[in-house]
Amino acid sequence: MRKHIFLFGAALVAAACASPPYTYNFDHYNYNSGKVKQAEKSSPLTVSTREESPLALREQDFVASTALSAGVSETVKVTPMSSLKQKADRYRNMSKQERRDFKKEVRTEVRNFAKEIRFRESGANIAATQELDDELKLAIIFGAVGITLVVLGGINTIFWVLGVVGLVIGLVFFIRWISTQ
C-alpha cells in the first residue's frame, strides 16, 4: 500500500512539473515583419519627406538596442536640450515650402486634437450628470426600503429581517456601482 501511495505521489509531482502541451514559443514569429510594408503603402508622403519632418517618428527612437554592451557609450553626451537642438536644426534646414507644409500639418493636428477632446469630454460629462446609473438607482431603492423596514422592525421581527436583507442587497448594488466608476 505504501508503495502505491509513493508511486501515485511521484506521478502527481511529475505531472505537475511537466510543461503544458500548448506552450507558446516567442522566438518563432517576427511580429514586426508586416508593419514596414503596411507603413510604406499607407503613407502618402515619400520616405525622404517623412524623414525631414520634425514631427516624424524614426524607428531607431523606439527600438531597443541588441548590443550586449552594459552601458551607454561615453562619447555621446545626452542632454535634455540635445534632441530639441536636433529638431530645431532639422526645421532650419527645411525650405520655405516645406516649412509652410509643416506649419499647416501642425495646425490641422492641433485642431483635430482639440476638437476630439472638446466633443468627447463635453458629451460624456453632460450625460453623466443628467442621469444616474441603473445600479445606483437600485442601491438607493433597496436602501430606502431596507431602512423603512428596519424602522418597522419594532412591530414584528419579520420586518427587521426583511429590512436587513434589503440593506444588504442595496449595499451589493452600491459596491457594484462603485467598482465600475
Image (spheres, rainbow, N blue to C red):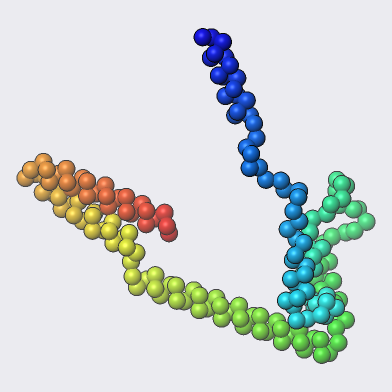
Q: Residue at x 27, y 52 (%)?
A: 170
Residue 5 in the figure: left or right of residue 134: right
Check the image and name the residue furthest to the right.
75
Image coordinates of residue 35 in percent, x first then y, are 74, 66
The quarter of the picture where residue 140 lies is: bottom left
- Is residue 68 or residue 47 the one in the foreground? 47
Image height of 33 relative to 158, above or below: below
- Is residue 61 or residue 114 the one in the foreground? 61
Q: Is residue 62 visible?
A: no
Image coordinates of residue 177 in percent, x first then y, are 37, 57
Image coordinates of residue 173 in percent, x first then y, are 32, 54
Q: Residue at x 21, y 56 (%)?
A: 144
Image height of 42 relative to 138, above or below: below
The C terminus is located in which quarter?
bottom left
Image height of 86 relative to 168, above or below: below
- Is residue 138 or residue 94 the one in the foreground? 138
Count of marks, rendered view: 0
Q: Is residue 120 visible?
A: yes
Residue 170 in the figure: left or right of residue 123: left
Image height of 4 relative to 31, above or below: above
Q: Residue at x 82, y 63 (%)?
A: 60
The quarter of the picture where residue 101 lies is: bottom right
The quarter of the picture where residue 112 lies is: bottom right
Residue 117 in the figure: left or right of residue 52: left
Q: Residue at x 14, y 50 (%)?
A: 149
Check the image and name the residue furthest to the left.
155
